Image: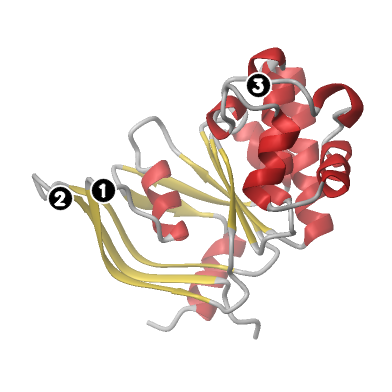
Amino acid sequence: MTAPLIACSDIRIRTRREHTLLLAVDRLSLAPGSRTVIMGPSGAGKSVLLQALSGRMPGNLEMQGTRTASAAVGRIGFVPQRGTDALHPLIPVGAQISLVSTAGPAEVADAFRSVGLDPETLMRRRPAELSGGQAQRAAIALAFLGAPALVIADEPTSALDNATRDETLTILRALSDRAGSALVVATHDPVVAESLDADRIDVAGGRIARLSPATANLLATAVPA
C-alpha cells in the first residue's frame, strides 16, 4: 500500500482570539499523484482545509491535531484565485518567477510554453499588462516549476469565463500528470471535478460532509484510526 503524501488526523482549526471552531477533520489523506477537488459554498471551510493540508496557518488561526507529511513533500506549489495575487505588480513576470523559483531563464521560458504562453512576448511584461487568463497561466507555471509533490489551488477558475476556465483546467490536469504532482483544488464549480477527473470532498459548516467513493476508500485504508 502506498504511503500517503499528507495525512491529517483529529484536526481542529480555531481563531486565536475568539477560539471559534472553523474546521474539524477527523482524518484525511492525500495519495501521491492524486487529484482531489474540495467543494462547498462560500464560508464552508474549503480554504481553511487547504491551509490544513499545506500545514501553513495565518497568524490569526491555530491548528490542533496531527499533520504528517512524507519526505517527498518539499516546496508546495500554490495557485490563487487570481493570478495577479501570486505576482508582484512592478516586476516583469519572467524575472520575478525566476527570482522566486531560482530557475534560470531557459527553464522559466519552458514553463511559460507548458501553459501556452509565448515567453518571447510575455516574460518581459508586468502583471498588469497580462489578461486575467494569462496571469493565471503564469501563476500556474510558477506553481509547477520544479515538479513539486503537491500543488494546491484555491478557486483558480472562479474569476475566469467558461472558455478560459476549461483551458485552465486542461493545463492543470496536463501539468499534474506530467510532473506527477498531487493536485488539490478548492472550488464551488462542479465542472471542475468532472474536468479534472478528480476525487471529491464536499465541505459544509466546517466539516467534511461527503466523500467520493475513491476518497472514502483512501481514508479507510491509508490513515490509521
Colouring scheme applied when the structure was drawn: secondary structure
The nearer-to-camera label among 2 and 1 is 1
CA distance for labels 3 and 1: 28 Å
The nearer-to-camera label among 2 and 3 is 3
Read off the residue under disc 1: 59
CA distance for labels 2 and 3: 35 Å
Residue 85 in the image, given as x and y percentages of width and height: 53, 29
Q: Which residue type carries mark 2?
A: Arg
Q: Which residue type carries mark 1?
A: Gly
- On the picture, is 99 further left or further right than 16? right
Q: Which residue occupies the foreground of this view, 7 or 85?
A: 85
Q: Which residue occupies the foreground of this view, 83 or 8?
A: 83
Read off the residue under disc 3: 127
What crowding class fits label 3: few (fewer than 14 Cα within 10 Å), some (14-19), or many (20 or more)? many
Q: Which residue occupies the foreground of this view, 91 or 168?
A: 91
Q: 222 above or below 213?
A: below
Q: Specify the label residue 97 is tagged with.
A: none
What crowding class fits label 2: few (fewer than 14 Cα within 10 Å), some (14-19), or many (20 or more)? few
- On the picture, is 60 further left or further right than 9? left
Q: Specify the label residue 16 is tagged with.
A: 2
Residue 42 in the image, given as x and y percentages of width and height: 38, 30
Q: Quadrant of the N terminus?
A: bottom right
